[in-house]
Amino acid sequence: MARPKGGDSITPKKGGAKGRALRPRQVYVFTEGEVTEPEYIDLILKKGVPDKPGRTVQHHIANPNAEGKLRKPYRMVQDAVRTLRKVEREAKAAGLKPYRVTGGVEEGDWNWPQVWVLFDRDGHQSIREAMQLAEKEGIRVAYSHPCFELWRLLHYINYTSTFGTEACGDANSRLRSRPGFAATYGRGVRSVSEQESKHVREEQVLSPQGTDGRRYREARKYARAINKRCESSNPNDWDPYTDVWSFVEEGLLLSHY
């Protein structure tokens, strides 16, 4: 399991505005999964390409040891709100100003902290309420229907069919059946269990050298296309759907990986 990276708070530093500009953005992430999402984040931050040179991220998995009942979407958003208020107070004390982009123009400090929650549709009943609370309180959300495995699957194929309410097992099965997937776990490996497949390997998401993040860019293109097909205002009905790419670019400040 991935552990929080870096310090636990934002502390004042010397150097005035220049010093503040060089400080990494602190990003706190609540994840529904205990293994897959933290491993994915660790991997792409190590191998990914920053969108803007000099802008880096220090991430913290905010709920690494939380039990299952504390990993429900609405509860994670509630916990995320408390974390956001705390880190915002620390950021203000350190001299940072809230960041936003208006009409393509940046205002405030780019490294103003963010708090994200990554969760799935699965069989949860509080998806809409969780998203409404997140929007109200300034929490960023990356949502997948039926689950995070759809985002991983899109690194292999352009999958567009619906799954249903509780079909994460189906998404995982389709992922494990992709040619070459099992071999990423070792030479001669021909199949892996659902539990084993929770561990993310480089070869499952990274692009070949010299292709400028082709694999990521294609997965993002596929994801945006299926998302546009979702006409309902109820996220429970967005099937399939994933906007993990927004977390990659807006939260982790990566161009590709």
Image: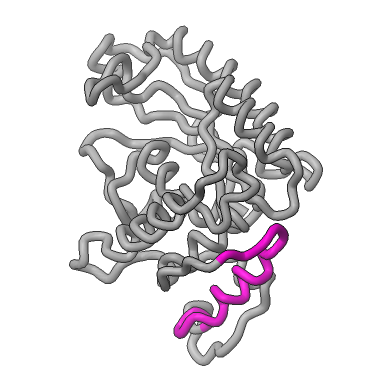
Q: Any magenta on residue 172? A: yes
Q: Residue at x 67, y 62 (%)?
A: 164
Horizontal relation, residue 74 to residue 57: left or right: right
Q: Residue 76 is drawn in which quadrant?
A: top right
Residue 250 placed where, x, y %?
Answer: 38, 37
Q: Give the magenta range.
A: 162-182
Residue 177 placed where, x, y %?
Answer: 55, 82
Residue reaching furthest front?
231
- Closest to the observer, 220 or 195: 220
Q: Any magenta on residue 189? A: no
Q: Residue at x 61, y 41 (%)?
A: 234
Residue 127 placed where, x, y %?
Answer: 67, 40
Residue reaching furthest left?
210
- Closest to the observer, 158 or 1: 158
Q: Residue at x 62, y 50 (%)?
A: 237
- Closest to the observer, 92 or 12: 92
Q: Is residue 102 above or below residue 30?
A: above
Q: How many marks?
A: 0
Horizontal relation, residue 224 to residue 22: left or right: right
Residue 90 placed where, x, y %?
Answer: 51, 14
Quadrant where the C terminus sits is bottom left
Horizontal relation, residue 211 to residue 226: left or right: left
Quadrant where the N terminus sits is bottom right
Q: Residue at x 55, y 88 (%)?
A: 189
Q: Is residue 229 above or below residue 209?
A: above
